[in-house]
Image: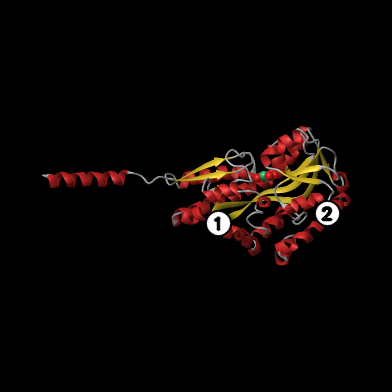
Amino acid sequence: MKKTILTLLSITLITLGGLVQAKPITLKFSHVVAENTPKGQMAIKFKQLVDERLKDKVTVEVFPNSQLFGDNKVLEALLLGDVQLAAPSLSKFKKYTKKLQLFDLPFLFNDMTAAEKFQQSPQGHALLKTVENKGLTGLGYLHNGMKQISASKPLHTPEDAKGLKFRIMSSDVLAKQFEALDATPLKKPFSEVFTLLQTKAIDGQENTWSNIRSKKFYEVQPYITASNHGLLDYMVVSSAEFWNGLPDDIRSELKKALDEAIAFGNQIAAEKAMNDKQAIIDSKRTTVIELSPEERQQWVDAMKPVWKDFEGIIGKDMLDAAIKANQP
Ligand code: SIN
């Protein structure tokens, strides 16, 4: 009798055990921009794809607008396991690799086609791996676009920027770029830029049309110079511990979804660069300054000498490969 009761009990437990579902993997994706930006849309798309394809196995939670972590903290948070996915700007990896400084060099890429061509080249792929020995896994590049310079006064030539204070991302190349104009660069988190501009604690900043529009910088900056002088793109990253610890089938499904979401984000980036510029012009809250070829050349001449300070760290081969991507 005792034996029968024990057997029944173990059968019940086994049956119940079969019914208990494995807990889904939670993947927190933290970023600093608004939802209506290339990165914001890419994150939402990724969540949708994972919801459809890995329902009950993986849950994606997206935290935009620096809700969870600002850009100076998110990579540490990844390594601590507090978030599992992030896509900081390529300018924000200085603590993890100096090689990505390449992407900050002023007037390196003529346009987004060249940036894409280089990122998809063997050298571009090699740069994704430069964060590996710091415990990060680079999963792909995502575009935002070319940067413009906004300011409290009209900037037609580099001379006009002299003495002004500009907020920059945490990049030494960007610091040197503004120092080359005899301006003062200030490394500040993205979440503080609007207030710094509004309170006139700084005179200007550099950013893409989509960030200038979505964060309303154009409402507190009377002038924007359409300089297209540099690139603002992202690296989508996870921690090696999390990414390599995933079951193989889940990791490959997630990578597939990520690649599709990145392609979607890149398409949005191309559309937004044009639409957001026009919307800013139409708002009449600011004046967009178009440079003549002669004026533009003056910016190139003032900023480009910065390259020589970083060539040794970045590597001549890498630099040459990036320059070559400008060829049709
Ligand atoms: C971002 O696009 O993620 C932020 C860019 C910035 O810090 O200016």
- Describe residue 92's horizontal placement relative to residue 135 as left or right: right
Residue, disc 1? 135
Q: What count of labels does the image hold?
A: 2
Q: Is residue 259 visible?
A: no
Q: Quadrant of ligand 1?
A: top right
Contact, CB < 8 Å: mark 2 with mark 1? Answer: no
Q: Secondary structure at mark 1?
A: loop
Q: Position of residue 11 (x, y in %)?
A: 22, 46
Q: Position of residue 289 (x, y in %)?
A: 83, 42
**From what the image shows, is residue 12 above or below residue 304?**
above
- Describe residue 149's horizontal placement relative to residue 22 as left or right: right
Residue, disc 2? 300
Residue at image point 59% right, 51% down: 236
Q: Position of residue 231 (x, y in %)?
A: 72, 51
Q: Residues within 10 Å of mark 2 (few under 14, many from 20)?
A: some
- Describe residue 7's horizontal placement relative to residue 15 as left or right: left
